[in-house]
Image: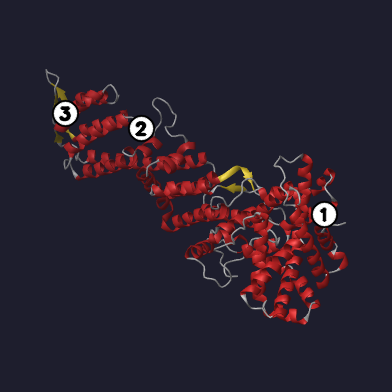
Amino acid sequence: MATAQEYAAWIVQNADKRGTPDFETVANAYQIAKERETTATTQQQILQPVQEPSIGQKILGAGEAALTLGTAATGGTLGQIAGTLQGLSQQILSGQFGTQDAVRAVERAAAEGAQALTYQPRTQSGQEQVQAVGKLLSEVLPPVLPILAAPGQVGQALKTATPIAQATAQRGAAAVKQAATATGQAIAKPVQAGVTAVQETLGMTPSAPAAGRVSVGAAATPDELRRVTTAEQLGFVGPSGLTAGQRTRNFADLQFEKETAKLGETGAPLRERVSNQTANLIQQFDAMVDRTEPLLVDVRDIGKAVDRAVVNKAEIARRTIRKAYTKAENDGSMLEPVSLDQLATTAVDVQRFEGVAPNVAPIRKEAIRLGILTEDADGNLIAQAKPIADIELLRQFTNEVTDWTDKRQSLMARKINNAIDVGTEGKGGESYKAARKLRTDFANEFENVGLTAKLLATKKNTDERVIAFDDVFNKIIISAPLEEMNKVRKTLLTAGPDGKQAWNELKSNNIRYMIEKALSTAQRDERGQPLIAPDKLNGIIRTLDKEGKLEALYGKKQAQQIRDLGEIAIDIYTAPPGAINFSNTASALQVALDSVGTFSLTGIPAPAVTALREASKYIKNREVRNRVRRALQPLGE
């Protein structure tokens, strides 16, 4: 003889063939199931010894769990409706309708109806598997199975059963129909409580209803409005607009979106949205690159362009200085004799560095040879009055023998030149003073700035550059302190069209650098686009911002745009801890359900296989698609 559960399952499985069950059929099934359930419950109270289930018991338990899923999705809903209507009619006829006792009675009837038409596992293995799968479904997938759903979302699940409820009510007594219509809100509470009771019976913890979702007409939070406004200003609208979870940063919304995106066709719209956002993000950075109209892409070519601009400007400055000195010599502005007392003191001071600064000894010897300094019997250096022309020869010699890329040599040379400047300050004619100013400006731009000096210098006794062309971008934009970067910037921007273009090449390449560092070289989306790591992107942005380089390079407006793009990347790709299930439970469950055909080889009864196939539709049903569609709607729609 068939059990009540098997009979209930048979009614559900054949509903499509026999038409929608009428009120009397469902009610009779409910009464039979209820009576037999009482007997079965009594028999199951006999204690069994605890032992590890065998392979056969596990297979049987899997079959029972599958049958429970299938009947819960169909018969459970019918049972809830039948139990609710029967409870209402009984309370109306008894005259108790509207009292607290009547409400509790209807609650019990709804819960009993849902449980009676849902197959209840009889083996311990089946019960354990139902609890495990039920908890998984309530946490990972949208709650549309009435027995396994969260209580706060049962109302949504019952919407799919509304046609059955209406047909059943129409076949019932007129009084019941009128009561159900007039007390629709009263029905919701007992049904919700009934399902909660069933969940507690199965040992499952109901998942909390999603909180924080901005519904149509609800006031969005300031943070959400800020994110939406920023996204729209950056062009993230329409197909690339923020999803509900990305806007609100609500845990439940993000968990749903991240998990559902893993589910084949069901999650395809979510995956497409993120792909659109990735493409838009990359396009935003590409637009910044194009804004400066760069001509070069290869870092070596960019390095050559920068070097060419700096060298050309330095050479033009040198020619200008030579002309100025020639004029001063010709008009007699450099004939005034000057005694460099401070140079004598400095020469003695730097003499102790001869072992580590190779330029110290040659400079001292040249000063003595020119007669600017003399050495007495005790070896002391004494300054002698000499024309400014001779003193400028010493300055020229000092600059030529100094490796300005060497910190010690450049320090010693600056001390010598400073002593010469002190001695010649205010001396000579106007032409000389003009020439001296030009030379001082040159030193400040090309010699006293370590980075610029290195761009011009070659390694000692070789033609090899101190900074290779391939490293020019990195040395100027990434590694250099802000002060030195700004000095190179000034040099390039005052070096004519080539210099300005070279600076634009550096700025453009820095945008490429940021996005390329943030792109994954191994992972790509369905379109083949490399995935973006928001932590890497924002790490680069923060580093540039902390040093003040972001605004120095791009100005306040564009710097803020770059910061906003970094924030958008966080909104798109990240979720609070725990919202993403890295074990891929959702996709794994789908694979298991889609592969149900393999279970038929294990001897599981055909009804269980059928029920499991029906359960596989759970993750693809209309409610999930509707929630995905709502997640993709713009704010306020």
Closer to the camera: disc 3 or disc 1?
Answer: 1
Between 369 and 99, the one lying in front of the other is 99
Residue beneath disc 3 = 344
**Residue 155: x and y, percent?**
66, 68
Q: If the image is split into quadrants, where does the C terminus sit?
A: bottom right
* Numbered badge on residue 27: none
| Among the two numbered marks 2 and 3 on one chain, the one whose residue lies closer to the N terminus | 3
Any part of residue 53 in sight: yes
- Residue type marked 3: Ala
Q: Vertically, is 221 above or below 131? A: below
Q: What's the distance in space between the residues labelled 3 and 1, CA to CA?
A: 104 Å
Label 1: element kind: helix
Residue depicted at x 85% and y 51%: 606
Q: Tell me where residue 67 sits by quadrant.
A: bottom right
Q: Tell me where residue 152 sits by quadrant.
A: bottom right
Residue beneath disc 2 = 405
Residue beneath disc 1 = 610
Q: Vertically, is 85 above or below 300? A: below
Relative placement, left or right, of 4 versus 501 is: right
Which residue extends farthest left? 377
- Residue type marked 2: Thr
Q: Are marks 2 and 3 in contact (CB under 8 Å)?
A: no
Neighbourhood count class around disc 3 (C-alpha, 10 Å): few under 14, some 14–19, many 20 upward: many
Q: Vertically, is 13 above or below 367? A: below
| Among the two numbered marks 1 and 2 on one chain, the one whose residue lies closer to the N terminus | 2
Between 376 and 207, the one lying in front of the other is 207
| Among the two numbered marks 3 and 1 on one chain, the one whose residue lies closer to the N terminus | 3
Label 2: element kind: loop
